[in-house]
Amino acid sequence: MDARNRKLSKILIGLLLILAGGVVIFFSIFAMGPLPVSKGMAAIYWLIFTGGMNVVGGIGYLFLHNRAIVLTLAGVLIIVNLIPAVQQAMSGNYFLFPMIVMLIILAVAVGAISLWNESK
């Protein structure tokens, strides 16, 4: 993989993380509605936090060049995305579950591409 393709893959994955995180935030905020959030809706706060972390992670991935920091970022994103995924699977409420799974896959791709680019 030449340098141009590596740069394009990094830009694409970073922008996908930002876009998917923004969609999660958008839908999570509108899921709360105008009423105060009940105890059962506390998972929405995790989704908003997860979306925000993915936006910040996507921006960081676009500008970071240190392999150790990118791998740490990928690990943090995987853990942050696993929390609402497990929470939703246990409660039986699968609100935005496909988006969360896609974000987990993107976080794994961040780490895999970082390792693969450095090995070349």
Image (spheres, rainbow, N blue to C red):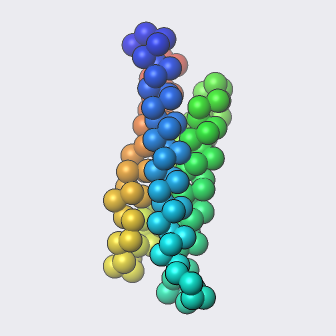
Q: In front: 65, or 9?
A: 9
Residue 1 image offset from top left, x and y in percent: 39, 13
Q: Which residue is drawn at 51% across and 53% down?
A: 21
Q: In which quarter of the image is residue 9?
A: top left
| Left or right: residue 119 compared with residue 72 | left
Question: How many numbered badges does the structure rendering display?
Answer: 0
Residue 56 image offset from top left, x and y in percent: 63, 47
| Left or right: residue 28 compared with residue 53 | left
Q: Is residue 84 above or below residue 52?
A: below
Residue lying at the far top in this picture: please name it: 2
Q: Can residue 58 be seen in this view?
A: yes
Residue 46 image offset from top left, x and y in percent: 56, 69
Q: Is residue 78 visible?
A: no
Q: In front: 117, or 25?
A: 25
Residue lying at the far front in this picture: please name it: 34
Q: Which residue is drawn at 65% across and 29% down?
A: 64
Q: In front: 22, or 92?
A: 22
Q: Which residue is drawn at 53% across and 61% down?
A: 25
Q: Residue at x 50, y 29 (%)?
A: 11
Q: Quadrant of residue 42?
A: bottom right
Q: Quadrant of residue 38?
A: bottom right
Q: In this view, does 62 lie above or below 108?
A: above
